Image: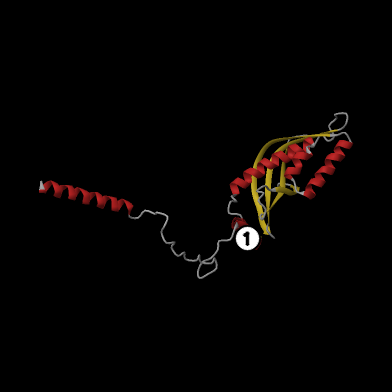
């Protein structure tokens, strides 16, 4: 019998120890609040705040791909040229069809006014224009500049097109111009890097002879 008492007490002791371990380290809601250390100010010591893209864009001015990449970390040449090529096709189609709503989304203000006047003149004369873009032989970046947080990228397009202008009686206005021809276009796209809008707008166009 004495041994049974010892065993019972031993079991009770073990249970108490296990219970104690399960309670230790748990929060009961009555703990003393720990003293919080104040957060270090952003400019204290060696801590340097990382500037946002908008901060970088506002501070940078210069030319070249690296300057633009510093102002816009998401910019890649391949992605830009892909979008510029799509815009090239869309602008040509919208201009031929007189789609001012589409052009408004793609063009800067001054160029939109110029295109609008040309389309209105064509409509007033009851003329029509069709543009068939047969192929784009080359699309390459000629120049990149960032001035006052506005990025400008100039693109060289070498394409084969057929442009046919007709008068009110559906007669071809210029037979020579209606033939398939190689055309070199120099287009400049702009984007305000301080805005959340990621879209580029066409602000300038010119056609040059391909002397290469």
Residue carrying label 1:
55
Q: Nearer the viewer, residue 69 or 154?
A: 69
Q: Nearer the viewer, residue 39 or 160?
A: 39
Q: Nearer the viewer, residue 195 or 210?
A: 195
**Residue 196 visible (yes or no):** yes
Give the colour scheme shown. Answer: secondary structure
Label 1 crowding class (10 Å Cα cut-off): few <14, some 14-19, many 20+? Answer: some
In the displayed structure, would residue 139 be above or below residue 172? below
**Residue 212 visible (yes or no):** no
In the displayed structure, would residue 98 be above or below residue 35? above
Left or right, 78 with respect to 119, comes to: left
Left or right, 106 with respect to 47, comes to: right
Q: Residue furthest front?
A: 1
Question: Residue 184 at x, y = what percent?
Answer: 71, 45
Question: Residue 186 at x, y = what percent?
Answer: 71, 48
Q: Nearer the viewer, residue 42 or 134?
A: 42
The residue located at (86%, 36%) in the rendering is 123
Question: Residue 210 at x, y = what percent?
Answer: 71, 46
The residue located at (22%, 49%) in the rendering is 12
Dividing the picture into quadrants, the one containing residue 60 is bottom right
The residue located at (42%, 55%) in the rendering is 29
Dividing the picture into quadrants, the one containing residue 25 is bottom left
The residue located at (89%, 37%) in the rendering is 124
Q: How many marks?
A: 1
Q: Residue furthest bottom?
A: 45
Question: Residue 17 at x, y = what percent?
Answer: 25, 52
> Element at badge 1?
helix
């Amino acid at each position: 019998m004495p041994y049974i008492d010892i065993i019972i007490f031993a079991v009770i002791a073990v249970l108490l120890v296990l219970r104690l371990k399960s309670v230790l380290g748990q929060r009961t809601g009555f703990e003393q609040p720990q003293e919080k250390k104040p957060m270090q100010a952003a400019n204290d010591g060696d801590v340097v705040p990382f500037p946002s893209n908008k901060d970088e864009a506002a501070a940078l001015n210069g030319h070249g791909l690296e300057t633009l990449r510093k102002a816009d970390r998401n910019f890649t040449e391949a992605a830009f040229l892909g979008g510029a090529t799509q815009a090239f096709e869309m602008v040509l189609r919208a201009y031929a069809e007189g789609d001012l709503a589409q052009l408004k989304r793609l063009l800067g203000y001054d160029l939109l006014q110029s295109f609008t006047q040309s389309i209105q003149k064509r409509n007033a004369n009851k003329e029509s224009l069709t543009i068939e873009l047969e192929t784009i032989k080359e699309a390459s970046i000629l120049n990149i500049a960032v001035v006052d947080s506005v990025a400008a990228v100039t693109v060289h397009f070498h394409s084969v097109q057929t442009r046919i202008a007709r008068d009110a009686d559906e007669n071809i206005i210029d037979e020579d111009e209606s033939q398939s021809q190689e055309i070199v276009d120099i287009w400049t796209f702009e984007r305000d890097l301080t805005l959340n809008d990621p879209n580029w707008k066409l602000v300038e166009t010119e056609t040059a002879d391909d002397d290469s």
